[in-house]
Amino acid sequence: MRKVVLEATWIGRKASVRVRQPVINVIGIFTNTIDLVTTQGFIAVTTKNIKSPIYINLDPYTFFLKVRNFREWLSINQSRKIHVKNNTLHLGPYLSLILKKAKLFDPSPELNKLRNNCYGVDSKKLITVKKKFIALSKVAGKTINDYYFNLFSEGALRLYQLLSSNRKDSHMDALLRYLGLGNGLTPTYDDFIGGLVSTTNIIHELGQYIPKKVSFPLNTLLSRTTKVSAYLLTSLSEGDISDIHLNIIRSYCLGDVDALLNYLMDFISLGHDSGLSMGIGILTGLYLASMYKEIQGTEESVVRSLRMLLTDLN
Amino acid sequence: MSSIKEEIEKANKLATDRMMDSEPHWVDMDIAKKAIPGFKDMMLLHAGPPVTWERASGPLKGALIGATIYEGWASSPEEAERLLKTGEIVFTPTHPYKVVGPMAGVVSPSMPVFIFRDIKFDNYAYTNMNEGLGKVLRYGAYGEEVINRLRWMEKVLYPTLKATIKEYRKDNPNGLNFKNLIAQGLHMGDECHNRYTATNALLLKEISPYLFTSGMDRKDIIDSYRFIANNIIFPLNMGMAAAKLMTLAAHNIKYSTIVTVMTRNGTDMGIWVSGIGDEWFTGPSPVPKGVWFPGYSEKDANPDIGDSSITETAGFGGFAMAAAPAIISYVGSTVEYAVENTKRMYEITYTKHRYFTIPYLGFQGTPTGVDIRKVVYTGITPTINTGIAHKEPGIGQVGAGIVTFPLDPFKEALRKFAEKYGI
């Protein structure tokens, strides 16, 4: 088989630091993505058309449309060590990835523009967006099993309690109780929590509405879910979000409901139900932000309100 | 009562059945303003969705200027530009008129057009004649050689072909079955968008006896034969008219999520969806990646342009690249890529074509009927092959390549669909 050498087109700022290590572990291989981990954190190598968390971006034109055989072609598996020499990642016997010309990408300047200028979208409109997002996903052929709806509601409530009280450990434990439930290497509940917490964390960093930031304990994550999901959740909570996720938050801050739904639709295509779960998680995070903005209600009113958002999922 | 999902399934099956069962035939030729219903003087048709003069791309502007000069409405490019800018000459998309044209796709009232009829569903479609490669009107060139060639086509090629098809119909009253030519072409190494080498030979084989007995001047017959024989993509426009009839048969079917138009004007690309009707959903037209003519590179390229993606909309062209490995020498990439692209397009299409098959894939039908639901579900958008025009007016073709459409128009269409059907 012919060896292919590709040049990365751009690389996330954090990933550029992480790949300075000589050895990196493979933690997951998907049809379009290789997930890697270093002692400093998580890296996803994805193709250009894939809009999941993107850290090193490859131009797919040369060969990446062969994605259906991607796993076999790479001839690498989980736990394999990837070597880094001369700023080049050697991924299996057939693929080398030169990072030298990759442009550094850092979403923080975009977010900085929104700092203290996040006007938000009112919660009623977010419920309408949710209804449309679910309906459009359904027409496109993606649904979430009803079973997860209750878990999402409970997770959102636990996050609210975590954000609103000082009983950090017990609420964190409750938030992570259903971790690992669902399909795939990033299970359904994990995707929801990833979207939810990364969103509330970023809104908090923008100086708006959300009272504090939540950090996941990596060891707990590793004991409860897949390795891929554990590292992905950690990265998401640290603010390593995809450009689409960023655009959703920007649309929310600018009050642009139409753009918000439009960007949410980009999540539909991701994974089995990962994109849909993460999209609902993001929407729920935005909804929590709006609730903090609009009301200082009792816990009962928040529960009612969250149930209003996370009802009739299908 | 059926659920919405069942309604969509039924509608999409009907739409793709009609698309595949359509029977496009070349039946006649005429002057555009006589043949095309609603076509008027001081009016030009162009490829793609609507666009203003200010936003129009270089090659589209060039072709509109050239057509204005060809019609005798202006004697200089400057005068033509003024008439187009001020709206004294109206330019409007081809598709609502059931017309298709490659690249800029400009059709003017005096231009001769092929007339195609779908004998199964009794629809008509129209297209202009292909001028060849390089410096041609459809790529935005409008110099003297371009205008002279168009005049020769009007004075010599058009009457010769009109007489030929008339003669042909004495033996074949329904006209020339173009679906058969495409099906055969796909088995002979063409994909019938950018490669028509085999189909052109088949076309000439089919019409030659009638060309020779058409009663036209001997020199005109020889010149016409040579022009077609030397222009290996001469059948492109005819294949597009056939594709237009196939997709027209699938259009306006309630609840259908099948795409019935995909087209580009060099600035925007746009789609129509069967169950939504003639509403445009647009996004920025991407710049193709490809192979460049000597002296040109990507920096010279205009974003993608032309109605020719109607071929992919109907289930051939770039979607059938696995049938045409030799296309790679023209558009770049690898043979493996050509095969993979066809396989990838199955993921966003409703069905496999009953009549267009690919020998290399075990005579599997081509991917047919782009379904907006599947595009949004997978995030995969149609990939086609295409010619590349220079971004400045007046220059022409600078290469050929491959282009992938943006996702936004498909997302917008799905939103509109949900709104229209109360989902």
Image: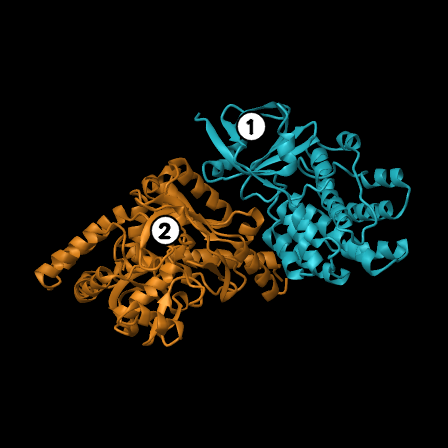
Chain colours: A cyan, B orange
Q: Position of residue A221 (x, y in %)?
A: 77, 33
The Cα atoms of the two marked residues, 2 and 1, are separated by 36 Å
Quick check: do tags 2 and 1 share a chain?
A: no
Question: Where does the N terminus of chain B fall, quadrant-wise?
Answer: bottom right
The vertical placement of B390 against B362, above or below, is below
Q: Amino acid at mark 1?
A: Asn
Residue picked out by circle 1 = A87
Residue at 30% from the left image edge and 70% from the top image edge: B68
In the rendered view of the protein, which quadrant contains the C terminus of chain B? Answer: bottom right
Q: What number of labels is visible? A: 2
Disc 2 residue crowd, few under 14, some 14–19, many 20+, Cα 10 Å: many
- Residue B149 lies, with reference to residue B75, above or below; the image says above
User: Who's the residue at 45% across and 41% down the image?
Assistant: B343
Q: Quadrant of residue B171?
A: bottom left
SS at circle 1: loop
Residue A204 or residue B169, whichever sits in front: A204
At a point 49% along the width and 39% down the height, the residue shown is A60
Judging by the rendered image, the residue that carries numbered circle 2 is: B388
